[in-house]
């Protein structure tokens, strides 16, 4: 029998006495069944009295309240926690999707821009006399293709009449056909600009290909011919990574040309490559992307599957990249958390109800404290921080689960920040030398031009090209050539002022921009150029060998030689190659030769 605790009186004593009476009645009732006598036949008044005492018992009321509170709490926690987790996961996945789409789009943009820049450079240096000498023109193309193998399927020169190619390298089937109806040929010839054709399948190999073209001739005059480069879409150096890239288990990447309404490349079914996009109205988000929408959104695809989609532009080609991931996979952790919370609450409730009389206040107090702290964190009254684990019970397990979730969210945020920082650096710096790359240099040049326009100041732009670098690769290997480039970058950085910018455009081409603060840009540029010549003129020690190379420098002054980035770069490049033409190891100012 239950005895009242010593020293207790008043309501507590009366409650314990009532509990003893109820338990005594239950024991008597169970005893009849144990003796096989069947249920006792109590008078109606006795049955009514026992039911009344049971319904009015504090134990019954506490158990009923606990069941109701437990049910409400279970539903409330499941809804609130799931929404909180889903919101956090949504923000993280959206940011990660946008980061992936942006990184891939920038990478493709750089690769397209690199190929167009190569075509422009080759067209500007193509001797006009070769247009009437097919054999020499073919040899010239073969030499450039070997030096700059950016176009996997070669180069060709097409006359403005659109007839068969004058020359191509290497020889490829189809070069003797007429090109007068090709979109890239008409665009380059009629508009005098770089053009990117509609992707197509090679009739011989069946592989997807694309053609890029530029006009050949003097600016302002009708083109003398069209220089084109052909590359396969699937080569690793171009778009080969897209079909093999997966986001999660079922997500991937898609590259779309809105001008051609064509899937350029896809990370899903290879059969979708070069397939037309769905008709207007089939996919509203795709329709918006076709008209310029860029960003992240949740939408259903043409199969009715809800996906988290991020869209980023490839500006140089007019394409856009789509990174997609089904929401069922993206938000699976939130669903598992809901199921975990429900399962955990069921067996924890049985324990609470079984020991309600003794441990209910102890169980509920940490839970109330944890819920209060979670609510304060959710409402912004306090910082997100792990909750203290008072006891290692079900409530402690729930708190540990929250703390683990909080740690995972923080780790994901830190990983995302680190990944974004790494991607940003990779997008703006040369991986070999650590110098700013072409994209970063263009941004700095535009900013410097805008600043100098406001303050009416001037600065110098220097293009540098290594003399005799190719034999280094041929004689000592590419690893030695890479080491020489790293040492060249280090010496150039020491030869300029801390304020100046040294960047690598690609290959053995570097550029130096002497920023604001140069009172006599020509004199200062000559001084810095001489220091660069002296620095590069010293022998390089690589793998026990002593290597010597030279340096040619072309210089343009802003604003004397132009107020736009394209003109400044063109003039500095022209001065550089004029110096290499008349004799290497020179410093040539654009004004001296063309002013």
Image: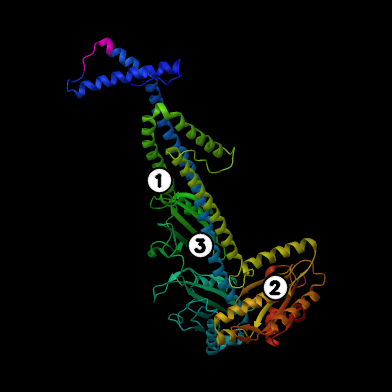
The alpha-carbon separation of the residues under discs 2 and 1 comes to: 54 Å
| Position above or below: 124 against 457 | below
Is 43 covered by the magenta stretch?
Answer: yes
User: Which residue sits at x=38%, y=62%?
Assistant: 269
Q: Residue furthest left?
A: 36
In depth, the one of 342 and 470 nearer the eye is: 342
Q: Nearer the viewer, mark 1 or mark 3?
A: 1
Instruction: Locate residue 86, reporting x and y percent.
Output: 47, 45
The segment highlighted magenta reads 40-46
- Mark 1 and mark 3 lie on one chain; the one further toward the N terminus is 3
User: Which residue sits at x=60%, y=77%?
Assistant: 507
- Residue 336 marker: 1
Q: Quadrant of the C terminus?
A: bottom right
Is 100 covered by the magenta stretch?
Answer: no
- Mark 2 and mark 1 lie on one chain; the one further toward the N terminus is 1
Q: Nearer the viewer, mark 2 or mark 3?
A: 2
- Residue 259 marker: 3
| Position above or below: 100 against 368 | below
- Residue 493 marker: 2
User: Which residue sits at x=55%, y=39%?
Assistant: 377
């Amino acid at each position: 029998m239950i005895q009242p605790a010593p020293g207790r009186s008043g309501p507590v004593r009366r409650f314990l006495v009532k509990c003893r009476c109820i338990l005594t009645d239950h024991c008597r009732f169970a005893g009849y069944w144990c003796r096989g006598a069947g249920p006792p036949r109590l008078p109606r008044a006795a049955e009514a009295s026992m039911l009344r005492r049971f319904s009015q018992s504090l134990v019954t009321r506490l158990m009923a309240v606990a069941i109701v509170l437990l049910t409400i709490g279970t539903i409330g926690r499941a809804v609130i926690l799931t929404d909180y987790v889903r919101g956090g996961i949504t923000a993280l996945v959206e940011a990660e999707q946008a980061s992936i789409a942006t990184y891939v789009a920038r990478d493709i943009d750089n690769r397209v821009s690199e190929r167009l820049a190569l075509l422009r450079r080759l067209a500007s240096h193509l001797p006009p006399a070769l247009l009437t000498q097919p054999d020499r023109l073919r040899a010239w193309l073969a030499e450039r293709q070997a030096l700059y193998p950016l176009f996997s399927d070669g180069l060709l020169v097409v006359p403005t009449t659109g007839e068969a190619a004058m020359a191509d390298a290497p020889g490829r089937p189809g070069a003797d056909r007429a090109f007068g109806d090709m979109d890239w040929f008409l665009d380059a010839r009629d508009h005098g600009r770089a053009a990117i054709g509609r992707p197509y399948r090679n009739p011989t190999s069946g592989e997807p290909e694309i053609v890029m073209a530029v006009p050949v001739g003097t600016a302002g005059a009708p083109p003398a011919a069209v220089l084109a480069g052909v590359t396969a879409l699937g080569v690793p150096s171009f778009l080969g990574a897209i079909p093999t890239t997966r986001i999660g288990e079922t997500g991937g990447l898609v590259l779309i040309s809105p001008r051609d309404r064509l899937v350029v490349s896809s990370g899903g079914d290879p059969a979708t490559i070069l397939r037309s996009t769905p008709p207007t109205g089939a996919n509203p988000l795709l329709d918006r992307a076709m008209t310029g929408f860029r960003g992240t959104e949740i939408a259903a695809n043409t199969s009715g599957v809800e996906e988290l989609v991020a869209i980023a532009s490839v500006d140089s080609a007019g394409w856009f990249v789509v990174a997609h991931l089904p929401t069922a996979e993206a938000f699976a952790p939130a669903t598992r958390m809901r199921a975990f919370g429900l399962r955990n609450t069921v067996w924890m409730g049985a324990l609470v109800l079984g020991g309600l009389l003794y441990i209910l206040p102890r169980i509920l107090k940490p839970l109330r404290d944890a819920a209060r702290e979670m609510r304060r964190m959710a409402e912004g009254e306090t910082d997100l921080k792990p909750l203290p684990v008072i006891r290692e019970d079900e409530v402690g397990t729930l708190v540990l689960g929250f703390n683990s979730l909080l740690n995972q969210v923080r780790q994901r945020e830190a990983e995302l920040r680190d990944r974004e920082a790494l991607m940003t650096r990779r997008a703006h710096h040369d991986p070999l030398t650590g110098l700013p790359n072409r994209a970063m240099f263009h941004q700095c040049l535009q900013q410097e031009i805008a600043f100098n326009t406001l303050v009416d100041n001037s600065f110098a732009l220097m293009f540098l090209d290594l003399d005799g670098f190719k034999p280094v690769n041929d004689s000592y290997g590419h690893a030695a050539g890479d080491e020489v480039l790293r040492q060249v970058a280090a010496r150039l950085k020491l030869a300029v002022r801390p304020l100046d910018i040294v960047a690598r455009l690609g290959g053995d081409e570097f550029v130096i921009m002497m920023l604001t603060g140069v009172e006599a840009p020509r004199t200062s540029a000559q001084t810095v150029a001489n220091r660069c010549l002296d620095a590069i003129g010293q022998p390089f020690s690589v793998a026990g060998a002593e290597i010597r190379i030279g340096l040619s420098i072309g210089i343009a002054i802003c604003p004397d030689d132009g107020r736009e980035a394209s003109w400044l770069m063109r003039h500095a490049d022209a001065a550089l190659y004029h110096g290499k033409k008349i004799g290497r190891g020179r410093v040539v100012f654009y004004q001296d030769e063309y002013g």
